[in-house]
Amino acid sequence: MRPQVVLPAGVRIVGAWAQRRTHREEGELIFVYTVSRLGPDVAAVVSRRLLADNEPVPEDAVWIDLIEPTADEDHRVEERLGVDIPTHADPDYTEPPEAHYSENGARYLHAYLFTSRDGPAVTLGVTFVITDTALVTVRNGNSGAFDLFGSKICKTATEALQPEALATGLVATIINRSARSLSQVGRDLDEISSAVFKADGDQSKRNQKYSETLIALGDVDEKISSLRESLVSVERLVLFLAAGTIADKEHKPLREANKSALRDLQSLEEDANFKAQKVQFLLDATLGLINLAQNDIIKLFSVLAVIFMPPTLIASIYGMNFKAMPELEWQWGYPMALLAMVCAAVLPYLFFRWRRWL
């Protein structure tokens, strides 16, 4: 039977994610995952629930997920585990000198996760605290990877869930979500590429398309930068996690999982670098097309200046006020001057058309 998520009053679940924008007086934002056995020969079942106000952390909690914790929530978890939980709500909080370190039998790991939902790309700071009995995660925002992994372990019965195994599985889910986000970036780039090289319509419509393309490329480049920052931080986390894994037969699956995660991270970083190069290529192509359009306008003005230069010269000559100008006494002088100006304008135009400059 699938375990149910128990929520206090005032909190709803939409999809796989509990609404966190609730008032503090309506419920605490501590998700706990506990392990229970239905029988001696039955695998363990994991259930998730949101702690009620002032409810103590269960002794059988294997994963404690803190979202925007208050000082009281921080203190309750510290009392349960007997280790320090670094949160910004703590009045005595100071930024750790290192992103990954060990202290009092617990390992502290910090990483930045890529998040983007219909808005600008941002990186979410997450702290992992791995103790002998439980995994603690501290974050100040939403991340689909946590909900996805939480639903996964609640659906699948298991023999045992160790804190380090939970951290490894959560990191693997984070990597998969990053790969999904990177694939979406690739699809966005394909759409932008098609829009750039297949732009149609008059020049004003193409200029509008090029302006939109520059804005879209800036947004995609921001996402790639955030993804690369996230991948690098997660890779450092996995390296520290792998370094602390015991080298025995029991922990061999964890070591293999960490090696697989490192390979995935390296391939994703290479893919992110490729997509960053593609962004640069599309940016150069868009700017090149804009320059071509501007060159066409400048060329048009240059040709018009050349076409009207000879007629202007003829008009200037016969516009001088000198007495000794025989042409002024000619009966057909004025029509001949007009004809000369028309010929002086038409001949350069025909020449430019013949050379395909127009």
Image (spheres, rainbow, N blue to C red):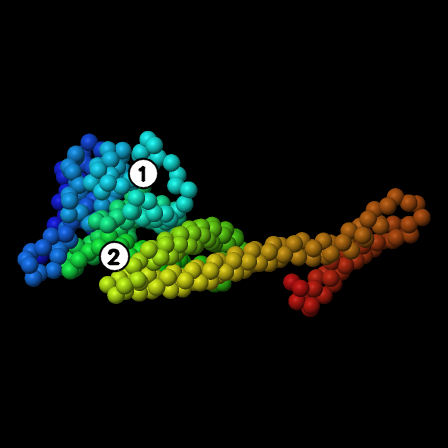
Residue that extends furthest to the right in the rendered view of this protein:
324
Q: Secondary structure at mark 2?
A: helix
| Residue 7 location (% of width, % of height) | 14, 42
Give left or right: position of 173 versus 46: right
Q: Quadrant of residue 299?
A: bottom right
| Residue 323 location (% of width, % of height) | 93, 45
Position of the C terminus, as image quadrant, is: bottom right
| Residue 98 location (% of width, % of height) | 41, 45
Give left or right: position of 185 versus 302: left
Dot 1 amino acid type: Thr
Residue pictured at 62% horizontal, 57% vertical: 296
Q: Secondary structure at mark 1?
A: loop
Front residue of 341 and 334 = 341
Residue pictured at 73% horizontal, 56% vertical: 306
For residue 165, which numbered disc appears in the image? 2
Front residue of 23 and 58 = 58
Residue 355 visible in this rendered orientation of the protein: yes
Residue that badge 1 annotates: 87
Residue pictured at 77% horizontal, 59% vertical: 344
Dot 2 amino acid type: Ala
| Residue 147 location (% of width, % of height) | 24, 51
Residue that extends furthest to the bottom in the rendered view of this protein:
354
Residue that extends furthest to the left in the rendered view of this protein:
39
Give left or right: position of 79 versus 116: left
Count of numbered badges drawn on the protein: 2
Of pointers 2 and 1, the one earlier in the residue sequence: 1
